[in-house]
Image (cartoon, rainbow, N blue to C red):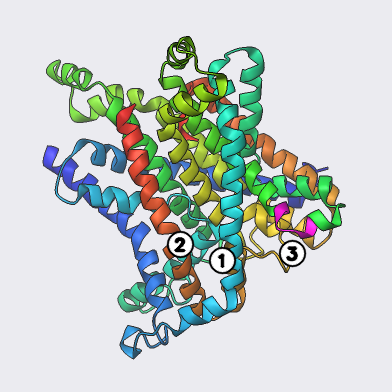
Amino acid sequence: MIFTNARYASSLVSTIVLSLSVTVAAVSLSTIAGFFLARSSFPGRAFLVSMLTLPLAFPGVVVGFLVIMLGGRLGIVGDITQFLFGQRVVFAYSITGLFVGYLYFSIPRAILTIMAAVETLDRSREEAARSLGAGHIAVARDVILPGLAPALVATSAICFATAMGAFGTAFTLATDLNVLPMTIYTEFTLYADVAVSAALSVVLGAVTWVALALARTVAGSTVAAAG
Amino acid sequence: MRALGFAFSFTLTLGLCAFMIVPIGMSILAGITANYFVGPSGGLTLSWVQQVLSLYLPSIVLSLMVAFTTLGIDLAAGVPFAYVLARNTGTLSRLAEELLSLPIAIPGLAIALGLIITYGTFREFRASWLFIVVGHVLFTMPFLVRSVVAVMRSIDLPVLEESAASLGASFLQRFLGVIVPNSLGGIVAGALMVFTLSIGEFNITWMLHTPLTKTLPVGLADSYASMRLEVASAYTLVFFVVITPVLVALQRFGAVRVRGT
């Protein structure tokens, strides 16, 4: 019934698509920043690291409010676009706002995991590849990324799982967003349909559990360390 | 090429940093601005913060109570459990570890639903703040146990224990005098994580709370929905004041641990 009802199915699909896109965006951005921060030294580096990782474990409601600060009706993005183009861009109360919120939520943890993984990389391999004539892109593609693969898989799984289950951000932004946690919530509180909300919870739990379990088999014990 | 790569990465990192920090700064500013429409030039004030404290102080106190109680239960049960997991590598302990990690995969909403369906009929318990503590313990326990197990596995526990035992130490003496001090790094890091998660927990708490058991994040959601922007921001500011020392301590310990292992 969960899969045949159009509303539940569409909510499941849109949650998975949203979580996947957040994961791809958060992990690719964090890989570049994490690698950069772990490898280079410049004044203010420690400060940048602490600023980027401070929002770790901010609750979803607060993240939602911060997204409103960015892209809400009085948000700074609106101010800037008003100034530049004469038109306010407001994105907070939609699926875009949710995307931005989950991105905000995922980046600190992803950067921490990736920085830790970069520190364990064996630099002599990169030097060997370079001495054999490999360019920067070839080194990144054939040496660094495979070395980081377990950490990347682990981070992706965690990002995906948190984005699937996150409720607070959606709750703050707009209650009519079509994502699974929101559907579960409305089924339970509005329609008092315990059976449907429990069934939806099982589906949601199963999807995230499979994602985490897959990551663990691919990446080994690193997932445990990341959690 | 190299300089170009540096410039690109540096700009991207700075951009991310701005993305993380600018909204926090704006929210803090809004919390102490007399009128957000006018902007900071219209004057700064602490009256919003005062209003928040007079409205929501019970929520803040309750959240601290819940967080400390959760932490106490987690430590009392989680550290011995982590020890059992670290010492045994059999199928049963693997299974226990897998079961323990389930609450990480299961969304908070589902945990809360399960608790309500199972224990919701015990009226007194359902209405008390301890019901929320149970939810928080379920949610935070895996984080503590994992942090402690990781450290316990990295030290040579059997050798330490055997040498203590050969000197005549009883199990309790060994546990408190040898095992706990040696895994203190993991315990402290895990405890800070538990505290942070419990203070900020919303997904479970929103479903479990009653009008008399509102925690800090529940109050936050309430103020976001029904108060003017300045009050909501001031409340967020109060939350930052509570959480930032813990997060900074967590960063210190996390950094030490990453470098140490």
Q: Secondary structure at mark 3?
A: loop
Q: Which residues are magenta?
A: B126-131
Q: Main secondary structure of the magenta part?
A: helix
Which sits in the foreground, B104 or B54?
B54
Inspect the image, locate mark 2, and give the three-letter code of the amino acid beneath it. Val
Most distant residue in the right direction: B121
Residue drawn where x is 66% and y is 28% of the image: B99
Q: Are marks 2 and 1 on the same chain?
A: yes
Disc 1 vs disc 3: which is toward the camera? 1
Q: Residues within 10 Å of mark 3 (few under 14, many from 20)?
A: some
Q: Secondary structure at mark 2?
A: helix
Residues tagged 1 and 3 counted as in contact (Cβ below 8 A): no
Q: Which mark is residue B173?
A: none
**Residue A145: x percent and y percent?**
33, 27
Q: Quadrant of residue A132?
A: top left
Residue drawn where x is 50% and y is 29% of the image: B176
Chain that bears disc 2:
B
Q: Earlier in the sequence, mark 3 or mark 2?
A: 3
**Residue A139: x percent and y percent?**
23, 25
Return the residue at label 2. Answer: B242
- Asked if residue B81 is positioned above or below residue A85 in the image, the reply reads above
Chain that bears disc 1:
B
**Residue B105: x percent and y percent?**
62, 37
Residue drawn where x is 52% and y is 82% of the image: B51
Return the residue at label 3. Answer: B210
Return the residue at label 1. Answer: B60
- Asked if residue A29 is positioned above or below residue B20 in the image, the reply reads above
Inspect the image, locate mark 3, and give the three-letter code of the amino acid beneath it. Thr
Quadrant into which the N terminus of chain A falls: top right
